[in-house]
Structure formats: C-alpha cells, structure tokens
Amino acid sequence: MSYDLIVIGSGPGGYVCAIRAAQLGLKVACVEGRETLGGTCLNVGCIPSKALLHATHQLHEAEHNFEQMGLMGGKPKPDWKKMLGYKDDVIGQNTKGIEFLFKKNKVDWIKGWASIPAPGKVKVGEETHEAKKIVIASGSEVSPLKGVEVDEKVIVSSTGALELGKIPKKMVVIGAGVIGLELGSVFSRLGAEVTVIEYLDRILPGTDDEVARSFQKLLIKQGLKFVLGAAVQSASATKTKAKLGYKLRKDDSEHEIEADTVLLATGRRPFTDGLGLDALGVKMTERGQIATDAHYKTSIDGVYAIGDAIEGPMLAHKAEDEGMAVAEILAGQAGHVNYGVIPGVIYTWPEVAYVGETEATLKEAGRAYKVGKFNFMGNGRAKANFAADGFVKILADAKTDRILGAHIIGPYAGDLIHEVCVAMEFGASAEDLARTCHAHPTYSEAVREAALACGDGAIHA
Ligand code: NAI
C-alpha cells in the first residue's frame, strides 16, 4: 500500500498525529504492534493508573471523611481483583475509542512492529509499505537501574504494579518522581506500608521547592515514608520477597530494606528498538533521543519524530501537541508547540500541577519576579469538601505583571492549572486573571486570589 503518511506508534503522540493528518486530507496509516491502540498511556500508563488513583481516593474519602458528613456504614473493603477489573474496563473503553476514531477518520491500522528499511518505506512483518512521509512516535520504555532486575512479579515497573497478584504488605518504591508518588499513593491507600527511596535530597526534582516540601509533608501524614539522599545499589528477589540495598549519600553508610514488592520508578528512556534507525543513519542525541529540528524533521528527509522518543518532557500531552503540530506542518500549515506553556500534573491527592517558570529558574536567570500565594484554607468550597490542604502560587514579572508561572498543590490542581495556561498563552498579566470574575464557591477562586496577591492583596487571606 502507498500512503501520504505512515505514523509509527499509536500512543497519544502517534494516534493524534494520524487523526489530525487524516482530517487535513492526507491518506494515513498508523502502525501498532500491541494488541490494542493507545500506547503506554492508555494501556499501561496514564489511564489505568488514574483509574486506580480514583478508586483508592474514594476509599480514602470513605475512611477519613464520610462519618463527619453523616455518612455511616463502616469502612469499605477493597477487592483488588475487582478493582483491577474496573481498571481493565476503563482501558478497554479508551483503546476501543481510538479504534473507533481511526475508522471514523479513515486511518488504517497496520498491525505489527515497524522498521524503516529506507526513506519512504515502512516494513511491517513481510510487507513493505510506501509512504511520502513517516512520523516516528515510538514512545519510551522503563530505564534500567544497575543492580535492580525487573521481573514484573516482585520487582516491578509501573506496568507490573498495575497487575500485581495481591496488595503488598510492604512496598519499596525507588524514585520519588511522578510514577513513584502516584503509584506509591495507590498502594499506601490500599493499606501497604510504602517507603520511597530517592537519590536526591528532595522529592519531585524540577518542581517548585515549596510545593515539593508541602507535598512531602502531606504524603507523610498519609502514611508514606521517605528515605532521601539514598542511592539504591542492589535488589534481589525470591518468589515472594525482595531485599534492597542502598547507600546514604551523606555518610556512605549502607542499609538494607525488605519488601513484598519493589517498584522501580527512576525514569524512562526513548524506545526505538527494531526501527532500524542506525542502519538508516538517523542522528541521535547524546541521551539516546532521536534528534529533530524545530519542525520535528530528523536527519533523514521525509522522516519525522515526536513525543517521548525526542527531546523534552515525557508527557502524553506534549506528545499530542507535537503530533498535531507535525501533522499540520506536513499538510502545509503552520504547526507549532509553545514549550513555555506545557503543564505538568501529579494525580495524587492533593494533586500537584505546574506550568512555566519556577522561582529557581527565575532566580537562575536573574529575573525580577513577584509571588502571589493563596492557601486553600481560605477557600470556602475547599473547606466544605475536606480539601483545604495546599496553595496556589503565581509568579509574575515584577515590572510588567505578566504571568511567568504557576504552581498549585490542592484539590483538582490538574484542572485548575489550565486557566493559568490559557492566560499565559494570551500573555496575560496577573491583574487580568484577578479581574476575571470567578464563580463562587469554586476551587478556582483560589487561583484568582493568588493573582490578586500579586497586586494589592488577596481578600480571604
Ligand atoms: P521521574 O524522572 O519523574 O522520577 C525519577 C526519580 O527517581 C527522580 O526523582 C530521580 O532523582 C530518582 N532516582 C533516579 N535514580 C535513582 C536511584 N538510583 N535511587 C533512588 N532514586 C533515583 O521518572 P518516573 O517517575 O519513572 O516517570 C517516568 C516518566 O513518565 C517521567 O518523565 C514522567 O513525567 C512520566 N510520567 C508522567 C505522569 C504524569 O504526567 N502524571 C505519570 C507517570 C509518568
């Protein structure tokens, strides 16, 4: 078969690219080797983990807040098998949804694993397809950690953690990044004793320091334990138990910890195996990413790449935006991604969300900024809903008042952040946000109050 565009990989980057290109009139196919569409995100990542976070948050609410609201009836008991069934249903609905969208938009799904034997050619199994353009959206895989061998039973990656045979009594998480804290929360809420071991002296590297500190305190209150400044050196597993060795960086002392389950969450790396990029002569970065120019073009004519396989944050929505942008570029339009306004969200409770600059990056750049902060304690809705932990922090240019970044820890922070994203896209000032009427009583009033705090002051602080 011959196509205008063949997209390799059907994760959020690939499937969005394929659909947008088809909408713009190109003849498109998408190659996917998994049994279902949607890539890591829909099958073993974002979506299933959010189902488990949702279910266990409901459990947490029932255990901690129901009685106070006059909802009696005792503590619900988690049925892990049933919960996994619910998670699998959610995956099924989402992956089938993409299949439906492919049919609706006339995108052909070529089943199998692709390689690129030559520019303009994509080989899947025994068949070679012709394509005027090729977009690689092959995603990422778990980065291995020396001394820790993942068996997906006792020592698991996020994939195995979503399929555990039972809820562990003791779990050790290696890495206090996004995966470690989200899945650590899930199992802690389900009753596991969770210890997170992190190499750095703080959790969530790269996020706002104040948010990370508050977040860690709240997680400790929820029962998670942390060992910071610790380098994991080894892990050995029997059929049911694991032993982990780590060294504290401050004094080089060596320690051991046992667990029923170890979750390795120390990062991911681009997945490009089997594509034949070496033979094709595709230039890679030092970090093993596919090198691209500003228009997602690789060093080979007609071959493009997006998402986790290239530079930038490994986020589904960053991949989606790149997918849309490259489709538009290939269709002769002006596709574009604003990398200054890509939000990040951690879907724990409370949620953490951020966009733009942090105080650290602004200080480093020597830029004068002001801070407007508002605690959810002053938000009526949050208080009524037992959700008053956390705050909104808006960073604005000291002179022009233009919003430079926002950092939220609190209820539905992942949704609240988007009004700041839109404001930033339009180059808004904190005053613009502060002058926008926000419905009462909503959590979003906390965002407005933080914007007010950049000026003459918040009302409810
Ligand atoms: P991460 O990069 O977010 O965090 C890894 C953590 O492991 C870091 O804090 C790092 O300092 C620590 N670490 C590294 N080596 C270590 C060692 N030897 N011992 C102890 N700690 C060590 O990586 P994570 O959580 O695995 O996530 C992978 C990717 O998936 C990230 O890019 C993340 O953004 C993405 N993701 C995003 C989600 C979201 O947007 N909500 C959810 C899940 C994953």
Image: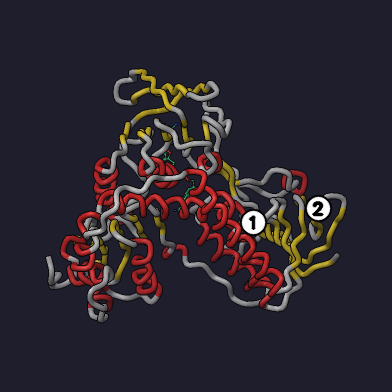
The answer to whether 11 is drawn above or below residue 142 in the figure is below
Please name whichever residue, 34 or 228, is drawn nearer the observer in this view of the structure.
34
At mark 2, the secondary structure is strand
User: x, y percentage for residue 316?
Assistant: 52, 58
Relative side of 42 to 108, left or right: left
Please tell me in which quarter of the rendered image ligand 1 is found: top left
Specify the label residue 137 is tagged with.
1
Three-letter amino acid code of the residue under disc 2:
Val
Please name whichever residue, 84 or 35, is drawn nearer the observer in this view of the structure.
84
Quadrant of res 288: top right
User: x, y percentage for residue 449?
Assistant: 20, 70
Disc 1 to disc 2, how far (Cα)? 15 Å
What sort of colour scheme is used for the picture? secondary structure
Foreground disc of the pair 1, 2: 2
Task: Tell me if label 1 and label 2 are in contact, CB under 8 Å.
Answer: no
Tag 2 residue: 124
Q: Is mark 2 within 8 Å of ligand 1?
A: no
Three-letter amino acid code of the residue under disc 1:
Ala
Specify the label residue 437 is tagged with.
none
The local crowd at label 2, few if under 14, some if 14 to 19, many if 20 or more residues have their Cα within 10 Å, is some
User: x, y percentage for residue 137?
Assistant: 64, 56
- Please name the residue shown 70% across and 61% down the image: 7
Residue 365, visible in the rendered structure: no
User: x, y percentage for residue 67?
Assistant: 23, 54
Point out the image quarter for the C terminus. Answer: bottom left
Point out the image quarter for the N terminus. Answer: bottom right
The answer to whether 308 is drawn above or below residue 452 in the figure is above
